[in-house]
Amino acid sequence: MSDGVFAALATGIGSWPGTDVREAASIVIGELPALPHLVELPARGLGADIIGRTGALMVDIELDVRTSGYRVAHGRSKSAQRALDLLHEDLDVLEELWETGGFAATHRVIKLQAAGPYTMAAQVELRGGHRVLTDHGAVRDFAESLTEGIRRHCDEVSSRLGVEVVVQLDEPSLPAVLEGSLSGVTRLDTVRAVPEPEALDLLDSMVRALGVSTAIHCCGSGVPLDLIRRTAAEAAAIDVAQLTSKNLDSVGEFLQAGKTLLLGLIPATDPVREPTWREVAAPAVSLVDRLGFPRAVLANQVSVTPACGLAGATPAWARRALDLARDVADAFQDAPDSL
């Protein structure tokens, strides 16, 4: 049974629609009292996206932008400085709202998000144009830089707000990294599949080095739940719609290991028809029933989130999605056997 900070609550994945950080942060903090998160607003452009924002955290590694995407740079570029400025603005706004809104008296934990080492290595190029992933030593350097950067980020936020900080590592590229399905510079330039033991070693080492409660988020198909289970991460954030009969055993083993599932139950974009909270809850109830677990698992080891980030939603639906997440989490807590 999980008793970690990720367990039995409602939270968000990270991204939010629009460009108004004050409004977005105020909504997220107010609507998610158990585990609010630092909002991400990718609509602001370069530097506000997951790769640019994570690059701003890295230590002694700078990124620049090319037509093909992000690339390792010799020094700090304008795009890197912009990413850093946006991050500092977000932290300043968060700190102000935390104090003036009275949240300091009621909120004890906040979640920070960053791209994980394999997603960064897959999406960033070396100076020669090849993915960082093609150079084993560079992948290690990226992981070390990212680990130190996230640790400093956690220390800063904890100091500013006086709260416990937890981390979510976003790894949307991890399935492709393990499968070897990423393209190279040319058709003849293949990108090797990373062996699972190698990926496990790096991810586990990073999670342990961070020294805070950590969840690994992978909302696409082929989520490597067995690998995540074997790391020191306390939780995995996954989209329930991506679960198939092939990975049900992995879900069962994950729960049996006492870890928490941050289950993406709420549509991340505006649905044609708004579902009721019971309709939203149904896939989770069906999942634990099929696995043969008591429904008390919903109250102890399942938290509720949108299926992925909410950047593609309208502001109205983004806010409603958090309401639904909270309603379903409350139902799991209050009477799971009656669902």
Image (spheres, rainbow, N blue to C red):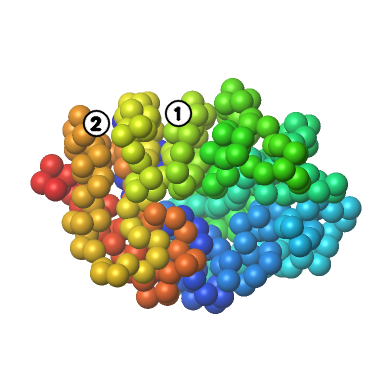
**Disc 1 marks which residue?**
226
Q: Quadrant of residue 325?
A: bottom left
> Relative to the observer, which residue lies in front, 101 or 323?
323
Instruction: Say which quadrant the N terminus sits in.
Output: top left
> Looking at the picture, does residue 333 appear above or below residue 93?
above
| Numbered marks: total | 2
**Disc 2 marks which residue?**
291
Q: Position of residue 91 (x, y in %)?
A: 61, 64
Mark 1 nearby-residue class (10 Å; few <14, some 14–19, many ≥20): some
Which amino acid type is shown beneath numbered disc 2?
Leu
Tell me if residue 172 can be seen: yes
Q: Is residue 31 left or right of residue 116?
A: left
> Looking at the picture, does residue 129 appear above or below residue 41?
above
Which amino acid type is shown beneath numbered disc 1?
Asp
Q: Position of residue 281 (x, y in %)?
A: 23, 52
> Relative to the observer, which residue lies in front, 75 or 38?
75
Residue in view at x 84 percent, y 53 percent: 73
- Measure how far apart labels 1 and 2 are at the Cα level: 16 Å
Q: Position of residue 78 (x, y in %)?
A: 81, 67
Q: Earlier along the polypeptide chain: callout 1 or callout 2?
A: 1
Q: Position of residue 164 (x, y in %)?
A: 51, 48
Q: Is residue 20 left or right of residue 324?
A: right
> Looking at the picture, does residue 265 appear above or below residue 30?
above
> Relative to the observer, which residue lies in front, 290 or 8?
290
Tell me if residue 207 can be seen: no
> Looking at the picture, does residue 24 appear above or below residue 72?
below
